[in-house]
Amino acid sequence: MLDINAIRADFPILNQKVNGKPLVYFDNAATAQKPKVVEKAIIEYYETINANIHRGVHTLSQLATDAYEESRKKIQHHVNAKSDKEIIFTAGTTFGINLVANGFSSFLKKGDEILISAMEHHSNIVPWQFACERSGASLKIIPMNEEGDLILEEFDKLINSNTKMVAVTHISNALGTVNPIKYIIDEAHKVGAAVLIDGAQATPHIKPDVQALDCDFYVFSGHKICGPTGTGILYGKEAWLDKLPPYQGGGEMIKTVTFEKTTYACLPHKFEAGTPNIAGGIVLGYAIDYLNGIGFDKIKAYEKDLLDYGTKKLLEIEGLKIYGTAKEKTSVISFNIQGLHPYDIGVIVDKLGVAVRTGHHCTQPIMDFYGIPGTVRASFSFYNTKEEIDILIEAVKKAKQMLS
Ligand SMILES: *Cc1c(COP(=O)(O)O)cnc(C)c1O
């Protein structure tokens, strides 16, 4: 088991009062808190080696470049990519998906199909709508059922030789559903389609193995895995990244520039125009080290325990309904109480120190599916406790009492 006291001591932000009550932070699916090692590494970077990378011959520039490239290698090993050329630093999941969708649209034509699922985050919907508008391709949706599982028989019917891209989330941020992505990837490859996996919600809980999955692209955000905001990773198979046109033009992504013609830099730099978030990229490596230091097996078991406990306790509240009851799910609980607006519940529990998310969670189609305006979402991390869940339960009961 985890040494929860030691872990909580790594997160100073948790040890404070909000609205006069001890903070209970249950908005981890929106962003994770940062351990001290991450905070320290940011300060240390700026106090010791801050310089622009891949440019100067001077010592600081070399040190910063080395640290940045070392972090890239660390992330390569973390996701088990074949080469560090396949690891592109981005500003986050949204940026990564836009990069792929934008470039991929140049391969599409009328009659081609892009397949996404009914439970995608807006970040994995809108860029593909852009790609379809640009190319004349059409967007198809893998439906889901009441429990919040994808309906695979429908997926089997939808996938065909016109399907060029299948873009699905590994884990739903609104429902917690863990999707059978290996099956989806294998079936997509049988018809020659590429596959992009949105790993934003999976990477806090799972160490992905991109070679075992055999996905073509895998994207995630640094800030959801205890790293800084404005950081993220796009993994792409080298062959795909070679083929894909660059996304942004500027410094760093070029080999030669004349006014007549520009040739592009090799991977990964082709997709890294301009001065990146250098400190962020370096520190993301520290965040990944921190999580691996705890161990994803332990994180998974601990969070499962929190999920089971939270689910049981919440369901004891009369009139409370949980959305997303897939057999395989992570520690995300979306719920509503009959007759009450999720926003009102969110405001009251905040007054009691409990931070939850309310609204559509950037997944409006899921809310439309259930015919609701939104949900209250409590998402647990490995630094949360059952005692905190008890506080949530009391807060929700209080909210119910006040609003009914
Ligand atoms: C958070 C999230 C995103 C968007 O990530 P950003 O860091 O905001 O770019 C996309 N997909 C899922 C499933 C998410 O949870």
Image (spheres, helix red, strand yellow):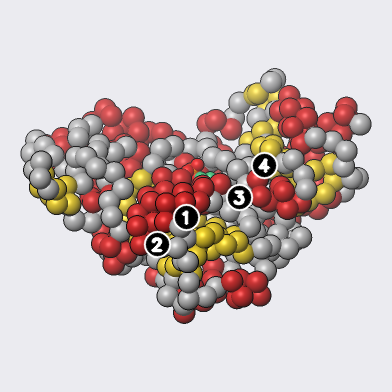
Whether residue 129 is situated above or below residue 216 in the rendered picture: above
When asked about the image quadrant of residue 157, the answer is: bottom right
What SS does tag 4 mark?
A: loop
Of residues 54 and 266, which is closer to you in this image?
266
The residue that label 4 is drawn on is 360
- Is residue 256 among what the camera can see? yes
Is the residue under label 1 in contact with that under label 2 (CB below 8 Å)? yes
Circle 3 Cα neighbour tier, 10 Å, few/some/many (<14 / 14–19 / ≥20): many
Q: Secondary structure at mark 1?
A: helix
Horizontal and vertical percent for residue 346? Answer: 73, 32
Residue at (46, 45) in percent of width and height: 94
Q: Residue at x 28, y 29 (%)?
A: 46
Looking at marks 4 and 3 on the same chain, the residue that comes earlier in the sequence is marked by: 3
Whether the residue under disc 2 has CB within 8 Å of ligand 1: no
Q: Residue at x 28, y 62 (%)?
A: 243
Q: Is the residue marked 3 within 8 Å of ligand 1, measured from its CB? A: yes
Mark positioned earlier in the residue sequence (2 or 3): 2
Foreground: disc 2 or disc 3: 2
Q: Nearer the viewer, mark 4 or mark 2?
A: 2
Q: Which residue is mark 1?
A: 132
Above or below 365: residue 240: below
Quadrant in which the C terminus is drawn: top right
